[in-house]
Image (cartoon, rainbow, N blue to C red):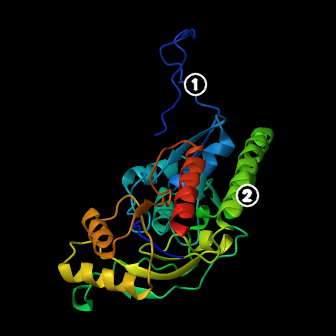
Amino acid sequence: MTLLLLSTGILGCNESNNKTEIITENTPAVKSSKIKVVTTFLPVYLFTKAVTGDVADVEILVPPGTDIHDYQATPDNVKAIATANVLVKNGLGLEAFLTGTVKNAQNSKLVEIDASKSIKVINDISPVEETKDKDHDHDHKHEHAAGNPHIWLDPVFAKQQVINIRDGLITADPANKTTYESNAAAYIQELDKLNNEFQQTLQKTPNCTFITFHDAFPYMAKRYNLKQMAVVEIPEDQLSPADVQNAINAVKKYKVKALFSEPGIDNKLLTSLAQDLQLTVYPLNSLENGEKTPQYYFQAMKDNLKNLATGCK
């Protein structure tokens, strides 16, 4: 069965207790004993928050739903990093904005955690189908020289990311080692269970192939014996009728049987593809947008599994 996958893809100081006796008017405010951890975007935030629980204050730099690939840092980002103890990033070149931002923050005591450590990346690039005429192309491609960075969509690699975050936090804040180890173990147990669910469900539809408009799912495909056949480039600016027709032709070329969408894609294009190709639309989530609670990862991934299983039949 052949598939089409379509996607685009402050911490405040703790207030003093009102009941605390005030000795003089100049008594300094009591500072929080928690370390401040800054994360780059939603998946990294979810994993970090799962490990820290309540023993650290965790912030996120890139608001959920904002394109991490082309993100431009803000003055508030610089301030957040300047006052942080720890910075956690996905790595693999995804957060290009960090280089200048960290430099500008001038925080010599900052501990940086790269969550991609020890993960074998995918460098192979699927065939790219361009839908917009080259004369009008504005070059919205996302180049990943260090390898595809979307490792969090593979539960096994997500487990390694949690381990990397746990170990980095223990180095930065050894006083809370026991908490970090306990929280990480509980989350890893859920990730193992999720991986088993994916394996048991998708083994019923081996070699299910798909096309994607956002190269976010090669790790998931490789892990569960799915096949990403091509990446169809959809321009981010206004689509012409010719662009839509080019997209339809690309889908037909690979004999796609199902259509997947992700929040943020142009609904008109989605509707045109579905109508012209007579396909059912199923959602698939890259987790770059959503709820800021660690359990959201499992909710979204289980929804992905359900839709993959349905589309692969």
* Nearest to N terminus: mark 1 or mark 2: 1
Q: Quadrant of residue 32?
A: top right
Reply above or below: 222 against 168. below
Q: Quadrant of residue 228?
A: bottom right
Reply above or below: 107 against 269. above
Q: Residue 299: give x, y in percent of width and height.
A: 56, 47
Q: In the drawing, does residue 277 fall left or right of residue 191?
A: left
The residue that label 1 is drawn on is 30
- Name the foreground residue: 113 vs 310: 310
Disc 1: CA contacts within 10 A as few (<14), some (14-19) or many (>=20): few
Q: How many marks?
A: 2
- Please indicate, yes or no, whether residue 107 appears anywhere in the rendered image: no
Q: In the drawing, does residue 138 fall left or right of residue 297?
A: left
The residue that label 2 is drawn on is 196
Residue at left offset 61%, top offset 44%: 49
Disc 2: CA contacts within 10 A as few (<14), some (14-19) or many (>=20): few
Q: CA distance from mark 1 to mark 2?
A: 47 Å
Q: For the residue labelled by badge 1, is the local secondary structure a helix, a strand or a loop?
A: loop
Q: Residue 7: give x, y in percent of width and height.
A: 41, 67
Q: For the residue labelled by badge 2, is the local secondary structure a helix, a strand or a loop?
A: helix
* Quarter of the figure that contains the N terminus: bottom right
Q: Residue 196: give x, y in percent of width and height.
A: 73, 58
Report the residue that reaches farthest toward the bottom: 135
- Please indicate, yes or no, whether residue 277 appears anywhere in the rendered image: yes
Three-letter code for the amino acid on which mark 1 is drawn: Val
Three-letter code for the amino acid on which mark 2 is drawn: Asn
Q: Residue 62: give x, y in percent of width and height.
A: 44, 54
- Name the foreground residue: 104 vs 230: 230
Residue at left offset 40%, top offset 55%: 65
- Name the foreground residue: 8 vs 171: 8
* Quarter of the figure that contains the C terminus: bottom right
